[in-house]
Amino acid sequence: MSRIRIGLPWWALGAAVVFADFLTNHWVRLELAKSAAIPLASFFNLVSARNSGAAFSMFSDAGSWSRYILIGVALMVAAPLVWLLTMPMKRLEGLAYSLVLGGAVSNAVDRWVYGRVTDFLDFYAADWHWPAFNVADIAICSGVASLIVSTFTSEWDRLWSPACKER
C-alpha cells in the first residue's frame, strides 16, 4: 500500500478537526460579543474569549512575538506528524496523531489569521473556572490521551502475548 494511501484517511481526520474548529470558532466570533458568557448549565458557560497565549493563557502577556513562536511550534509538531501518518500503525496511534495534527494546525491558522485563538467552552465549579478552550484544544488533549493509552496497551500486549509466556 502506498504511503499516501495510508496517510489519506488520517490526514482527512486531521482536516475534519480543523474544519470543526473553524466552524465553531467562526460562529462564536460572529454571534457572541467579546467577553460574553451564556450559562448553559450549573457548571458550563458558552463564552467568547480570545487567547493570544498558549495553553492556559501562558505567554498571553508576552507580546506579539509569542504569536509567531507559537505558530512555529505548531508547525514543528505538525510536519513530522504528516510524515508519520504515512506509515503503517495501530488505529489508536493514527487517531492520536491525527487529532494532535488537526488541533495544532487549527490553532496555528487562528493565530496566523486572527492573531489569537478563539476559546468558548467554559467549565467551572463554584467560583473556580477551568481555562476556556475550543475544539482544537479538545482534539490535542484527546490525541495525547489516546497516544498514552496506545503506549500502555502496546506494552500490555507485549507483556501478555503468547510468545512472552513461553519464556
Image: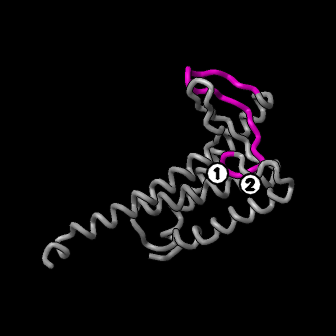
Image quadrant occupied by the N terminus: bottom left
Residue type at mark 1?
A: Val
Residue under label 1: 18
Query: Which residue corresponds to the image point at 56% horizontal and 50% vertical from the top-left?
Result: 139
Query: Which residue corresponds to the image point at 54% horizontal and 59% vertical from the top-left?
Result: 98
Circles 1, 2 touching at the beta carbon (< 8 Å): yes
Q: Earlier in the sequence, mark 1 or mark 2?
A: 1
Q: Quadrant of residue 26?
A: top right
Q: Is residue 149 above or below residue 30?
A: below
Q: In this orientation, which residue lies closer to the viewer: 16 or 42?
A: 42
Residue 18, horizontal then vertical, whole percent = 64, 51
Q: Is residue 100 above or below residue 61?
A: below
Q: CA distance from mark 1 to mark 2?
A: 9 Å
Query: Which residue corresponds to the image point at 74% horizontal and 59% vertical from the top-left?
Result: 70
Q: Residue furthest bottom?
A: 167
**Residue at disc 1, secondary structure:** helix
Main SS of residues in magenta: strand
Q: Is residue 18 magenta?
A: no
Residue under label 2: 109
**Residue numbers of the magenta segment:** 36-56
Q: Is residue 67 above or below residue 72?
A: above
Query: Is 137 on the left or on the right of 66, as rendered?
Result: left
Image quadrant occupied by the C terminus: bottom left
Query: Is 96 on the left or on the right of 29, as rendered?
Result: left
